[in-house]
Amino acid sequence: MPHLVPEVQVIGIAGIKEIQKADDLGKIIFEAARAQGTPIEDNDVIVVTQKVVSKAEGRIYKLSSIKPSSFAVRLGKRLRKDPALVELILRESRSIVRLSRHHLITQTKHGWVCANSGVDVSNVSGGDAAALLPVDPDESAKRIRRRIEELSGRRVAVVVSDTFGRPFRIGHTDVAIGCSGISPILDLRGSVDSYGYVMRVKQTAIIDEIASAAELVIGNASERVPAAIVRGVSYNPSEDGRARMLVMPERNNLFR
Amino acid sequence: MPHLVPEVQVIGIAGIKEIQKADDLGKIIFEAARAQGTPIEDNDVIVVTQKVVSKAEGRIYKLSSIKPSSFAVRLGKRLRKDPALVELILRESRSIVRLSRHHLITQTKHGWVCANSGVDVSNVSGGDAAALLPVDPDESAKRIRRRIEELSGRRVAVVVSDTFGRPFRIGHTDVAIGCSGISPILDLRGSVDSYGYVMRVKQTAIIDEIASAAELVIGNASERVPAAIVRGVSYNPSEDGRARMLVMPERNNLFR
């Protein structure tokens, strides 16, 4: 081969049981990766879906236990959603960004703009239950990372992913809502491109691209693959990197 | 191994010379993949960056040859951009979506909402040149695909990618602006999740996730990797699939 071939592998971690509150997610992922013959290596990025993080952290609420406000009842009628679900969505939100006949787009307390504050009723055990986003997904990522590093002796990064829609484009993609051990942006501003020109613009949201790459093996339907290893990415390790750094500040927001 | 490990490989195609107008991009990619020891296989998705497609299609314009309108001159002053560049951006646009002191967000004639109609001055040969998006990136993808299939005897899909910003999130990710041989959406609506619940919502924009995965090896700085093979993705082959299907119709657009 005349040159080094740049390659990234995305390896789904299967064979993971249904996650329960207080489960040791880092240990479960570490063991499942080893059991399937793909043990964790140095510089792996481990992507963990929000749903299992929320379950391990006990962020599952029975809708029948929630007393909706009168506003939630009115909004639920308009959106044809369970008022208890609407109540949870509102509790999780900082503000309503868009409201239509079918959609409730909010900004979550973390700052993410998404449908229904990320509150989800699919793929949650118990027909009557809703899964809320982790309280602090960057902290969740850090805890999982520390545990995996402790057990494996490897230095890794962790990304917590969720499935979001996008303004202007149909369809959903997975993005990062938490991370640890990785700088969320790969800043190419000021670097010189292959023709000698200075690139002034590009700031790659590398944790979002990693989350999307992982989704290609995670899927969401019949297989149970709640995590993946993304191996071979050139990323900047960072103790301070947090997904929350990707929240667009209000003053720069052209679309609010 | 107790179960099949789901795995996707992302392989950068390097060793590609600087692309010129009328170059046979399909042949160049096919040969470069073979030369580096990673020949194209059945069901590979070949991601090709917009920049090389635009170059091969002669979509490079010398700024000194463009006569800006008086509106482009005024807008250029406000945005501190070359008025000839602003003129090209306006010619490529259907409408202006947002205008601030620093940003010009337009909807392109294809329907994509992005900064500067996708017109780019970085990474283009000749200091005075701008690269416009392909006239019809879905057709570009189809031409490249036909050529690769002809030369390789393999059935593949092709995605043309570009780097876009996003409302509400800092940083850029690569998305698809053209495709051929693949259904752009993997529709999981109505399918049953791993706990027996019906998932009503998720429609994965799989071509965007593939573009983002490819960007992890493509980068944009010193290495010259203008294309990548994404291997192992479960996608729906389609003769009718077009990236343009991801353009949000005006009536469903909550953010216009």
Image: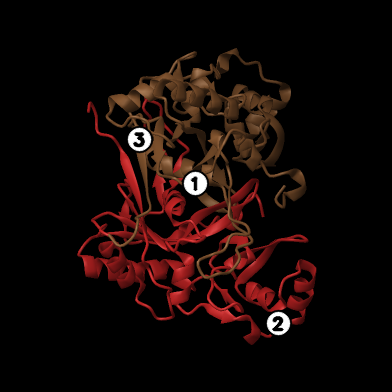
Chain colours: A red, B brown
Characterize the local packing of mark 2: few (<14), some (14-19) or many (20 or more) Cα atoms within 10 angstroms.
Answer: many
Q: Quadrant of residue A103?
A: bottom right
Could you tell whether B82 is left or right of B29 in the image? right
Label 2 sits on residue: A68
Badge 1 amino acid: Glu
Horizontal and vertical percent for residue A78? 79, 68
Badge 3 amino acid: Gly
Q: Chain of mark 3?
A: B
Q: Which mark is residue B209?
A: 1
Q: Nearer the viewer, mark 2 or mark 1?
A: 1
Could you tell whether B95 is left or right of B43 in the image? right
Characterize the local packing of mark 3: few (<14), some (14-19) or many (20 or more) Cα atoms within 10 angstroms.
Answer: many
Q: CA distance from mark 2 to mark 3?
A: 52 Å
- Describe the element under mark 1 as helix, strand or loop: helix
Q: CA distance from mark 1 to mark 3?
A: 16 Å
Horizontal and vertical percent for residue A195? 38, 24
Horizontal and vertical percent for residue A48? 41, 63
Q: Chain of mark 2?
A: A
Q: Nearer the viewer, mark 2 or mark 3?
A: 3
Outermost residue on the left side: it is: A153
Residue located 37% across and 68% down the image: A16
The correct choice, above or below, for A233 with respect to B89 in the image is: below
Q: Which mark is residue B12?
A: 3
Q: Quadrant of residue B35?
A: top left
The correct choice, above or below, for B7 with respect to A32 in the image is: above
Residue located 34% across and 60% down the image: B3
Can residue A136 be seen in the rendering of this structure?
Answer: no
